[in-house]
Amino acid sequence: MVNYRRDKTPGGTYFFTLALRDRKSNWLTSYITSLGYSFRRARENNPFLIKAIVVLPEHLHMIMELPGGEADYSTRLRQIKTYFLQEIVSAGEPLLKNQRNEYNLWQRRFWEHRIRDESDFCAHVNYIHFNPVKHGLVKEVIDWPHSSFHRYVREGLLPKNWSREFTGCDFGE
């Protein structure tokens, strides 16, 4: 088995991608309330801030900020995945198990990138918010309901008609 070296910077801000094993599934959006509950429950155990997020039917992208002095994002992500799995199982959804007798809901690994600076942060926020358009789920970013884009608009950080051509990036960080 390969040992992956991951950047573990205390108090870091990270971009993550989590994906369901079944890339044709729509469980993340069908069970969006359960996913939100899973995030809240994980945050109670191990605090973190979500700076930006988009939830698509079978994967999600987010920027997570860890508290100062803490670098363990793996536990936080594992808890989110576990709590969501418990919600899906409780709902009676038919899930297959693998050879280890584990449910095959989530892909085992995740994509991680430490945000280096404001420019990197802006690029990843833009990527997150544009993702539903990229995947052909909507024509306009504002039409996708499961995105922090709406919070950014409410807070005056992005205009309603934002698009990938938008070049301003002053998020007040």
Image: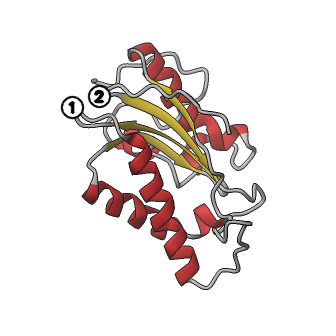
Residue placed at 63% from the left, 51% from the top? 108
Give the CA distance from mark 1 to mark 2: 6 Å
Q: Position of residue 29 (x, y in %)?
A: 59, 63
The reply to whether residue 165 is visible in this rendering is yes
Q: Nearer the viewer, residue 134 or 95?
A: 95
Quadrant assignment for the C terminus: top left
Q: Nearer the viewer, residue 2 or 72?
A: 2
Element type at mark 2: loop
Three-letter amino acid code at disc 1?
Gly
Residue placed at 73% from the left, 73% from the top? 96
Element type at mark 1: loop
Seen as rendered, the residue at the extreme left is 68
Residue 10 is labelled as 2
Please tell me whether residue 96 is drawn above or below residue 172 in the rendered image: below
Q: Write down the residue under mark 1.
A: 68
Ranked by sequence position, the earlier of labels 1 and 2 is 2
Colouring mode (rainbow / by chain / secondary structure / one colour)? secondary structure
Please tell me whether residue 94 is drawn above or below residue 141 in the rendered image: below
Q: Nearer the viewer, residue 91 or 156?
A: 91
Q: Quadrant of residue 58?
A: bottom right
The reply to whether residue 153 is visible in this rendering is no
Please tell me whether residue 164 is drawn above or below residue 30 in the rendered image: above
Three-letter amino acid code at disc 2?
Pro
Q: Position of residue 167 (x, y in %)?
A: 51, 16
Residue placed at 60% from the left, 35% from the top? 130
* Left or right, 65 with reference to 96: left
Quadrant assignment for the N terminus: top right
Seen as rendered, the residue at the extreme front is 1
